[in-house]
Amino acid sequence: ARELESAKNSPALEEEHRQVTKGKVRTRFPPEPNGYLHIGHAKSMHMNFHLAFEKLGVPEDMRETVFRYDDTNPEAESQEYIDSLREDVEWLGWTPAQTTFTSDYFDQLYDLAVRLIRADKAYVCHQTGEQISKSRSIAKEKAVNPHFEGDPNSPWRDRPIEESLRLFEDMRLGKFKENEATLRMKMDMSSPNFNMYDQVAYRIKFIPHPHAGDTWVVYPTYDFTHCIIDSLEHIDYSICTLEFETRRESYYWVLEALDLYRPKVYEFSRLNITYTVLSKRKLLKLVKAKWVAGWDDPRMPTIKGLRRRGYTADILNAFCKDIGVTRNENIIQYERLQHWARTILNETAKRAMGVQDPILVTISNLEEPVKLESPDFPFAPERGSHSIVLTPKIYIDASDFREDDSKDYFGLAPGKSAILKYAFPVCVNEVLYNDTGDVVELKVTADKDGSSPKPKGAITWVSAVPDNVVSAEFRLYNHLFTVECPGVDTWEAELNPLSLEVKAQGLIDTSVLTVNGQLPSVFTTFQLERVGYFTVDPDTTSAKLVLNRVVTLKESSVK
Ligand code: ATP
Ligand code: MG
Ligand code: MG
């Protein structure tokens, strides 16, 4: 890990900081409520609630993490997002020392902006957005070529302090239209750093705020606000992703200009994962365009989507711990996330048998049902077992029968045997077809006493007697994108049209039911033997069990 850059504070500010924090070490997690949290945020939370303290050697009782709603853009924010963020933080198991809203500081922020004007470090500007970009390009050119022609400064940069004070007040009172005036900070137009070109501190928006109501028509920007709130909340370590590194200079400029306590800023790399996108803007687009069923669609990399897919908080946190934090921009393989799902679910998900595409099988020499016991966890028989019933008519999965046999194939084929898991081998004697030539039934004979050579393959099955099975719709998910790294401009064209496959006629054994015979509760996860892990979807009704595939059992079968 790189040394944290120390921010220089006067002894008086250091002393004040110690008095406020009482020696505890503070970090913060500051999402904007403009969408749902995704797995990138899980990495940030893991860092801010846990890993940063571990790295710093802070004892558990000395740790404090502030969960802050960074809510300065009312047009993009909503109560729905505010609520979902809080739920996700809790669900992941994090307990904030305090939950705050940037908008609760709007009065203080306004006063600080006035102080900045009084110190001749901010001015009311009437340049349009376009004019501002133009002057910034001039400043950028001039930074590399001092002979470059043109004036980068706003014509209002040197207006009298009193005038700016009056006009800023007018902005607050709604006397200007949107885009007619902004408050800009008098930073450094000759800097090589683009982020020092007189950033906007306040802009006018005639939009009510989801948390602050309709009190304000001027709203502070991220650049003016973020450092100030970090400071007012006495954050020790302000940890953000690397793209903010160039904004570090302006972060300290504001705090120095206002003589406020300066937290230490530390950057780490953003999480990127193959076959998905981690940007709220893009995820919102998928929701709006109805590419997915909502923010919690099981294909989404959101916390809510992953949860509905069957990922648990333990899985996501184990993944975050595994990838750690670095300053190298890299892309994590999606398989790494799946690895943690398999590792943890193997220990927690009871086994059951089921079929996705049933084919009827009649065991000609079986007259009576046979009751069998099957372990909940085959690697730990002491953890219990459940009973299953083998009946003369059963279903197997269509993928376990082939008309054309081959050497490396161990399922059933005409004249070929396979073991019915937890029972005995059967051999196919006859294949029945319907009018259109599809296989509709197999007639097999059981080798009940094991007299013939033992077949290599074992297949799963369920009883065909309705009392012994539950109908289920299996939803099989594949990658949301067809390429590992969706392109900046091409990502929408790279969406996978086959990311959801539905098997509506599935069956699963009754061991998945509760002791009272009820359908299992939402988010209960099973291992469907030989197939994968499945979790109960909230679309489940008393009439229909809906199961989401979390992950297949083996990586090789991942699509
Ligand atoms: P997005 O582009 O998804 O909207 P953001 O950075 O604008 O991301 P915020 O809600 O402002 O989203 O982020 C809250 C915190 O989470 C920030 O500190 C941010 O750095 C961090 N964060 C966001 N995305 C990632 C990611 N992919 N990897 C790691 N941290 C992230
Ligand atoms: Mg942000
Ligand atoms: Mg963003």
Image: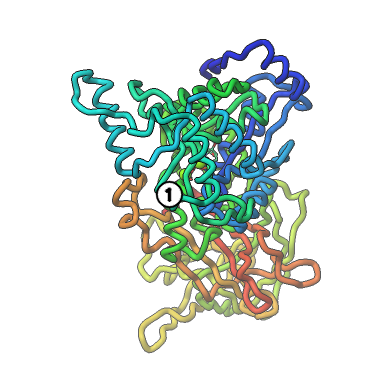
Q: Which residue is mark 1?
A: 276
**Above-or-below relation of 203 to 508:** above
- Furthest toward the right, the residue is 516
**Above-or-below relation of 17 to 382:** above
Task: Identify which residue is drawn at 59% across, 72% down.
Answer: 472
- Furthest toward the bottom, the residue is 435
Closer to the camera in the image, 8 or 481: 8
Task: Identify which residue is drawn at 48% across, 80% down.
Answer: 441
How far from the left and from the top, in percent, is residue 125? Answer: 40, 38
- Furthest toward the top, the residue is 11
Closer to the camera in the image, 14 or 286: 14
Quadrant where the C terminus is found in the figure: bottom left
How far from the left and from the top, in percent, is residue 384? Answer: 77, 54
Local crowd at mark 1 within 10 Å, few (<14), some, or many (≥20)? many
Task: Identify which residue is drawn at 45% across, 50% down.
Answer: 176
Determine if residue 1 is in view. Answer: yes
**Above-or-below relation of 131 to 483:** above
Closer to the camera in the image, 520 or 305: 305
Determine if residue 553 is in view. Answer: no
How far from the left and from the top, in percent, is residue 36? Answer: 55, 52
Q: Is residue 395 left or right of residue 140?
A: right
The answer to which quarter of the image holds residue 499 is bottom left
